[in-house]
Each structure stands twice: as C-alpha cells, then as structure tokens.
Amino acid sequence: MATIIDGRAVARQMRQKIAAEAQKLFAERGIVPGLAVVIVGDDPASHIYVRNKKRACIDVGFYSEVIELPQDTTMDELKAVVERLNRNEAVHGILVQLPLPPQLDDREIIQTIDPKKDVDAFSPVNAGRVLAGKYDFLPCTPAGIMALLKAYNIEVEGRECVVVGRSNIVGKPMALLLLEANGTVTICHSRTKNLEEHCRRADILVSAVGKPGLIRGDMVKPGAVVIDVGTTRLPDGKLVGDTVFDEVASVASYITPVSGGVGPMTITMLLQNTLTAARLQSGAK
C-alpha cells in the first residue's frame, strides 16, 4: 500500500519558516510582505479560494488586500485596478483570480501585472524565465509538487516522469521543473494515443487534467510515485482527483490524496513567492 504524501503537514512546516522570514524582513527593513488578490464576479469556488489565500496571508503575518469587482467589469476597469496595484509599494504580489468572466481577456490582464509582482508566474516574462531556468518565481502548483517530492526524499534525476495535462498553469511548467531536476519527461494530453502505455512507464506520474477516474490501477507501474493534481466536485459534493485512489494506492509507492495533497502546497508557494517579491523589491537578499 502506498505511503500517503501529507501536503498539509509539509505546508505547515514551510509556512512556519515563511512566517519567521517575514518577521525577520520586518525587523531588518520594516517591510511587511503584501499580496493583493483581484476577483471578478460571483463564482463560488473562486471566492472560497480567495478566502483561503487571505487567511493564509494573515496566518504568516502578511498584508492582504482583496479587491472584489462586479461580473460586468470591463477590460479598462480591470486593467486600471491592476495598474494601481502595480504602483502600490505596500503590495509586492498581485494575483488576478481565474477564471474571469467571458468579456475579459485573461492573457491581456496577466500581461498588465508588473512581472516583479507576478507571484503566480503566469506572465510571458516569468514563463520565459522558467523555461530558461533563470527565474525569481515558479508557478505555484508545480513548485509545490517539487517541494513535496523533496520533503519525501523522492529522487527525480534519471527517472521516467510522465505528466498528463499540458496547461500553462500546471502541465507545461511541471514538465520543465522535472526536466530541470534531470528527469526524463513525457507530456501526455487529450490527443495522446495509448495513454495507458505511457503511464505504465512512469516512475513519477503527475496527472493534472480534472477528469475523475482517468488514472486506474492497471495504468500505474508498481512502485511508482503518483501525484494527483486534478480536482472535481461530484454532484454529491464529494471532491475527487484524477486517480481511482484505492486502485492506484495499492500499486504505487507514494500517492497524494485529494484533498490534503497538492492543494495546501499551492497556496504555500504563493506565500513563498510573495515573500521573495518583497525581498527583491526592498533590495534585501
């Protein structure tokens, strides 16, 4: 039976360190790391995510600002809010909660964020830096997964790594980070033929699709490490991942649960990026 990777425990340890570093930054320079989150509309899931981010900021001693805008907000109005935050020296990190209403172009909005404050690392500038391996910030979910692997002493170098999903938020940067760690990486997606064969080769399998039951036990190599990023809310309210958990856990050596696996690490790495942004903007080491 697989060892359950406890994202909550790892996140708790990391947040204690982040809080201590934030106190040190304030003591030395009078700087309080600040994160501003902009949310447009009334999507219930987005509001839950934003509340969790605000609570996490408060817990580690950060300044937190949430700007709530109506569903019919225009591009010019949203860009004006972002540009105001770009100029606000108390705000070191800016996050625009996705998804946005259909009248808003998320790519254009993300490009409006000052790259020095782009703590999601979604902008073309920061995405390019991740590709080049010369970055200040990493996308939060892939960075959180790498931190989990490190916490459990799971070696990436020389191992077969398969990433299922090719989004700009998780799949593509996840593949880059595994490659940077000297893994041999395959990216699979909705057009991949014989997905099962690719998955069975993986020593480390990361699924980030959001399709319940996609990864079954017979698709997993015995002893593989399985990281389940997918989250889907079923009609009965149950939250499930991409894996058939009991089947995969009986084959894998390590597995992340849903919830309590990758999720807590995503917000933790957002806090880490905000702390890094505050240091860089203040000239601290």
Image (tube, grey):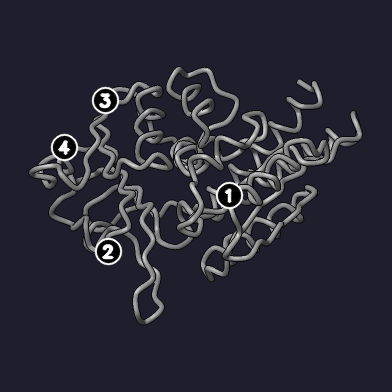
Decide which of 249, 215 is in the foreground and name it: 215
Tell me the CA gap for discs 1 and 4: 45 Å
For badge 4, the amino acid type reads: Arg
Q: In front of the other: label 1 or label 3?
A: 1
Pointer 1 residue = 75
Pointer 2 residue = 212
Q: Is residue 102 left or right of residue 197?
A: right
Decide which of 229, 74 is in the foreground and name it: 74
Q: In front of the other: label 3 or label 2?
A: 2
Tell me the CA gap for discs 2 and 1: 34 Å
10 Å crowding of disc 3: few (<14), some (14-19), many (20+): some
On screen, residue 181 above or below 42: above
Tell me the CA gap for discs 1 and 3: 41 Å
On screen, residue 60 above or below 166: below
For badge 2, the amino acid type reads: Pro
Pointer 3 residue = 184
Q: Mark 2 or mark 4, which is nearer the start of the sequence?
A: 4
